[in-house]
Amino acid sequence: MATVVAALAIPAAATAGTVFLLDGRGWGHGVGMSQWGAEGYARNGSSYRQILAHYYPHTHIGLATPRDVRVLLLEAKDAVRVGSAKPFLVVDARGRKLHLPARSVVVNRRFALRHLKLTPPLRFEPGAQPLQVDFAAYRGDVVVKAKPQGLMAVNVLPLDRYLDGVVPWEAPMGWHEPTYEAQAVAARSYTLATLHPGQDFDLYADQRSQMYGGVGAERSETNLAVGATAGQVLVWRDRIIAAYYFSSSGGRTSSVHDAWPRARQVPYLVSVRDPYDYLSPHHVWPTTVLTAERVGEVLGVRDVRDVVVLRNSSGRARAVVVTTAHGRRRFSGQVIRTKFDLGSTDFEVRAMRLDPVAARTEFGDRVRVTGFVRGLGRARLQELSVAGWVTVRSIRPAPDGRFAVTLPAVRSTQLRLAYNGLAGGAEPLGVVPRVELTEQDGRLQVRVAPALPLRVERLTRKQWRPVARARGRFDRRLVPGSYRVAVVGGREYLPAVSRPIALHA
């Protein structure tokens, strides 16, 4: 914590030119089994039991009694289309039955008026072919119920028929059999541990519960995995666990308490190493460059000066402290993930800032360039040349992140900090020619470095009028008066005008 506090105190004098580099790893909440990590274990010879034992320590595999589950397919609809390629049946709340031909029916107000004898909710039961809801096929029955917000459609089917439509949507094609089997057991456990018998449905058909695609999602290899593990669930202390899982960990999973601070910490949902997650396309994210203005815009704060990540025991972002010109604001890691649309809370923010350099520096002087870097191992100072950006110094910051280097003032240019192909904003360095004037025995002696075109001017009637031109040097006897030298400069130098000098007879 002392290091964190020191880091927060460093950039009090930072400018709006701070650039933040956001890096991260993984995809998902991080709790339980990493699906890409599980596939890595399978490719390295692990069985599904070994995979589950790694991600859910202190659990064992038990058997659960088969049962039906209820999956919400549609809600808040004015109408629900239900059909089948073969004749099917609708049963009302009183047990009345109506046989329907092989077609679709639209359940809406008109349907209710046409079938006044049917008492809702209505349960549609398939015949020789599965039912379809809005032309998507599902195993089992479909219950249509009227709610204040509109109609809802709920798919009621045996647990393993449900898993046939879950596992292929949660585990991509081409993975290994142990991965599918581990996914089947985890999904079965999660389902049974999260049922809601007192509500209208048990599960959503999307990421709020598990991705479920019905008949259209089914594949033979995942159906085999569901069948091979039939009834198997993960158990801790004689209770089926909510076996959370997610896509990619970035190398280490998260404890449940770190991911959801209000959740009770349990020994089977702890942070574990995930050595094979490197297979995931989200194992490491590309670096994102954020300006201070962009950070402030997203978070609704002004004059952002620094961003520091505070980590939890799983190594992920517990909170982010944003330092502004007006104080500090604290955001949870989950809020930052949501606002910046990040794959997980396993991210870090590094910073680099180049302070404004002197507006006008004489040719040949030494320029002091200062700034601040945090978390960058090999930051470089670059200048813009005719060949593009070239490195002029490697940055070696002090322990507090500050650095200072000196450069010779050779020409006007732009400076920037760069790191691994990424660069911050540019700061202009203006160089003016060095102009030296002396007078000796009525002679005006001028030296301009570098050797640029110069113009000798004489004060006449309160106006400076050119009287001679040269390049780099001038040495000539002139009539008495006040003189000065003007150098236009050009593309690489700022214009310069010397102090006046008096010539005497």
Image (cartoon, grey):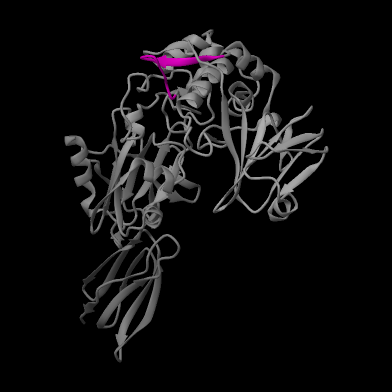
Quadrant in the picture for the N terminus: top left
Q: Is residue 429 above or below residue 54?
A: below
The residue closer to the viewer here, 376 or 200, is: 200
Q: Is residue 15 above or below residue 10?
A: below
The residue closer to the viewer here, 292 or 363, is: 292
Coordinates of residue 454 in the picture (x, y in percent): 38, 69
Task: Determine the residue positioned at 37% across, 27% down.
Answer: 254
Coordinates of residue 495 in the picture (x, y in percent): 37, 69
Q: Residue furthest left?
A: 2
- Res. 375 image quadrant: top left
Task: Determine the residue positioned at 30% across, 59% down.
Answer: 303
Q: Is residue 402 magenta?
A: no
Q: Residue furthest bottom?
A: 461
Q: Is residue 12 above or below residue 98?
A: below
Left or right, 372 with reference to 45: left
Left or right, 107 with reference to 326: right
Q: Is residue 239 magenta?
A: yes
Coordinates of residue 104 in the picture (x, y in percent): 78, 43
Left or right, 183 with reference to 111: left
The residue closer to the viewer here, 200 or 191, is: 200
Task: Determine the residue positioned at 42% across, 24% down.
Answer: 251
Q: Which residues are magenta?
A: 231-242
